[in-house]
Amino acid sequence: MLKTRTLLLAVAAALAASTTFAAAQDKARVAFVPQIVGIPYFDAMQQGGEQAAKKLGVEFVYQGPVDTNPVDQLQIVQNLINQGVEAISVSVLDASSLAPVVEAAKAKDIKLFTSDSDAPDSGRALYVAQASDQGLGYTIIDEMVKRAGEDAKIGIVSGEATASNLNAWIGYMQERVKEKYPNVTLLDPQFAGGSAERAAQIAGDMMASNPDLKGIIAVASTTCPGVAQAIETAGKIGAVVGTGYCSPNTARAYLKSGAFGYSVLWDPSELGYLTVWAGKQLIDGKTIPAETTPEGMSHPVTYDDKTGILLLGDPAVFTADNVDDFNF
């Protein structure tokens, strides 16, 4: 009798555990794989993704490499595919290498898409864009010329040389200078990977070898502190205008010290929110309208079904005067 009762209790416990597991699996999963974990920008995207998951009734999975290594990032994506995560978004480090994992995802009916950084020729389901690449490239140059002059020499310190979003912004900077500011000299970009220390070294060398340099643009959020600190260390505040694509919290001290004249970005928490919303639409098989206000967001977003780009909005410019109005 005791053995029978023990067996029945064990069976009941197993059934309860199975039911609990099944209930947990009732929630669809939307994953986001950033370029690197542990920096304020992607921390904010994570927070926005978590908010969206709670609002929309999905499970949010956040995993990324500890440094900007494309091989490590792709391995994380492949692991998520192997786990059967229903929708996976990636801030792409190497656009040329994403296509095989997109095909692997399709073979399992998993929706693989990009966010923050695109791989347009990979076959991805869609791209959640923070702002148009053209808008970001043009805005940072226009604001620099206002401060440094229409005959300025300007340097560029970027992150990973393979990051498609960073390269796209640089391309539009170059286009803007060529078309609108013929007397501006835009130096060839130099790449610091994901290291602020390397960015500081590059920016310092750039100022030393170009005494007539009037501005430096940090193209990756990871390079912003290095560029700003190099300007401070060189005693070039007021002589060299620093800027970059970095959050108000990252740029605040540098905006107030004068090392940065301004920074250009968007709200990464909103981008994280929109990423999870997009994943939910893909899982549910819903068509995204040309313009819509997602549940839980306060403003409309636009979608181009020809390019597959879901656009958050226009870029924002942060200065010493308005930076304290923001907290991300």
Image (cartoon, rainbow, N blue to C red):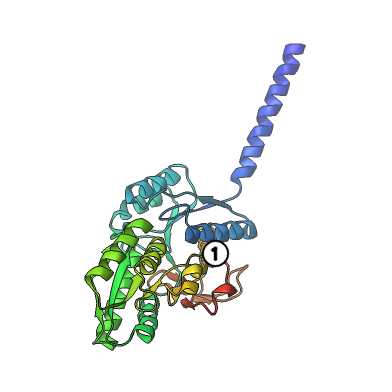
Q: Quadrant of the C terminus?
A: bottom right
Residue 131 position in % (x across, y down)? 44, 73
Does dot 1 land on a helix, a strand or a loop?
helix
Does residue 194 appear in the picture of this structure?
Answer: no
Q: Which residue is mark 1?
A: 269
Number of disc labels: 1
Q: Is residue 93 left or right of residue 287?
A: left
Residue 121: image x %, image y %?
31, 63
Tell me the residue at 23%/73% (across/down). 210
Q: Viewer-proximal residue, 106 or 298?
A: 298
* Residue closest to the eye, 103 or 117: 117
> Quarter holding the N terminus?
top right
Q: Is residue 71 above or below residue 127?
A: above
Q: Residue at coordinates 57% horizontally, 58% vertically from top-left?
A: 47
**Corner quadrant of residue 183:** bottom left
- Name of the residue lying farthest toward the right: 1
Q: Is residue 302 left or right of residue 101?
A: right
Q: Amino acid at mark 1?
A: Ser
Local crowd at mark 1 within 10 Å, few (<14), some, or many (≥20)? many
Q: Is residue 53 visible?
A: yes
Q: Position of residue 212 (x, y in %)?
A: 25, 78
Within the image, what quadrant is residue 227 found in?
A: bottom left
In the figure, residue 15 lies in which quadrant? top right
240 or 195: which is nearer to us?
240
Q: Residue at x 36, y 49 (%)?
A: 74
**Relative to residue 187, is residue 216 drawn left or right?**
right
Residue 206, position as x, y percentages in the image = 26, 68
Kindly identify the residue that appears in the image at 48 percent across and 52 percent down: 38
